[in-house]
Amino acid sequence: MFKVGSFKPIMARLNRKIERSIRDFNPPFTTLAILGLLYYFLFYFAWVVPFGTGIGWESLILRLIAMVLCLGLLLREEWPKTAQKWLPVYWYITLTYCLPFFFTLMFLHHSTAQLWVMAFTSIIFWLVLLVDLASAFILLLLGIVAAAGVFWFNHRILPLTDSVCNIFLIYIGFLVAVAILVKNKRRLENDKRLKTAEAVSHGIAHEMRSPLSAIIVKAGNGRKFFPALLDAYQLAKKNNLEGLEVIPPRRFEVIANLFDSIDREAKFANVFIDMLICNVKQDVLKKNATKVLKMSDCIHTALQRYPFSGNQERLIYWDHNYDFSFVGSEDRVVHLLMNLLKNALYYIVAAGKGRIDIWQTAGRRMNILHFKDTAIGMSQETQDMLFQQLIGHKSNKVGLGLAFCARVMRELGGSIECHSVEGEFSEFSLYFPRIPGL
């Protein structure tokens, strides 16, 4: 028997699916909300005031409901934090009502008016631009069915003439054609941008590796003889050699570790060049052998290879109580973990506070790796576009690294999700498929 309490997890799962489906589109919520408010307000008076009652059927209540939905979208940042997680579902409800439902209902009341035929056509373009193809079909179907139901409830009849049915069929076919064209265009443009980024990254890597290798070699040679120079300085200082310039203790300590610092920074740069190339490659796992791996081994390797600065390693707290196995490429998973480390440490340094917690848990169908930092968190708007490619600057708090993480997890048959509270924390949950029998 269905219980009211069981509705919430269903909605939560639906909300997560919708959230993942809109990430690639990054809809401009504020702009669309303002346009909706202006349209549903101004066009009502544009119809009613000049033409009086001779314009046919019109409803102020329907427009007010659409305006309230758009206003809620505009004020989404003012929602309670517990309500903001439901923004994806609210966005789809608003789209369904304001586009297919509203325009279909108006079209049914004015099926012979050419203006409303044209207006009905416009929702096809808007849906294709704002959501994925599957969502566009679902929203269009829900809106049309709901509008037809309301029309029938009010009039006990549906204007299903041959012309109306033909228009519906033509527009649905038109939706398919336009959606395929737009989707292919986006894919081609995105592939072109990724190939350009990959070519540029390889060029940068080629130009940077030679001087970095030279720096590492020279730092190694200098390290051999530098202690003798330091000893000579100490001896001269002890014997009060005339004309000796005294080096302050703090500066002397820095100079004593100079070549170690140069070597560490050069290797640090090499690691991030490797990460840059890895992040922009489109063939994530095709050229990397997969095998059964232990998650603890991958975490240990990532922590060993990551070039920490200062005491950053002390900010990491890893709970070893649970471990699991998965099938994948060690190189890619290690790079994934290093990307998460890099982002977390960047914001911990920027905030001047925070720590990183890493732990593993067993889910019903998946094993889960949790990666949490307590730096500055992120807004809901940032979370909505978190795993998109080519949003690559820190002001948006996302970049190629997280898009790479999402691609790796998809290739492994899993997924990555983020839960964050602005000003408090960001927690990434990585879902790895269980290996049967293990």
Image (cartoon, grey):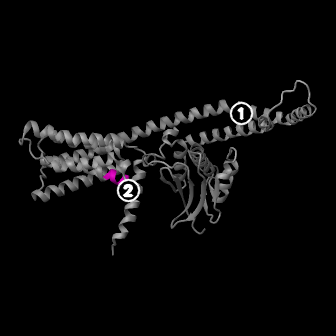
Determine the residue positioned at 38% across, 56% down.
83
Q: Is residue 86 magenta?
A: yes
292 relative to 412 in the view: left or right: right
Q: How many residues crowd around disc 2 within 10 Å: few (fewer than 14), some, or many (20 or more)?
A: few
Pointer 1 with pointer 2, Cβ within 8 A: no
| Mark 1 neighbour density, 10 Å: few (under 14) some (14–19) many (20 or more) | some
* Relative image position of residue 293 (x, y in whole percent): 64, 58
Answer with left or right where residue 54 lies relative to residue 144. Answer: left
Residue at which label 2 appears: 83
> On the rendered image, what quadrant is the C terminus found in?
bottom right
Q: Which amino acid type is marked by label 1?
A: Leu
How would you classify the magenta stretch by its main secondary structure? helix
Q: Residue at horizontal 88%, vertical 32%?
A: 233
Q: How many marks?
A: 2
Question: Can the viewer see residue 179?
Answer: no
Q: Position of residue 344 (x, y in %)?
A: 58, 48
Q: Which residues are magenta?
A: 85-92
- Say which residue label 1 marks: 212
Q: Secondary structure at mark 1?
A: helix
Name the image quarter holding the N terminus: bottom left
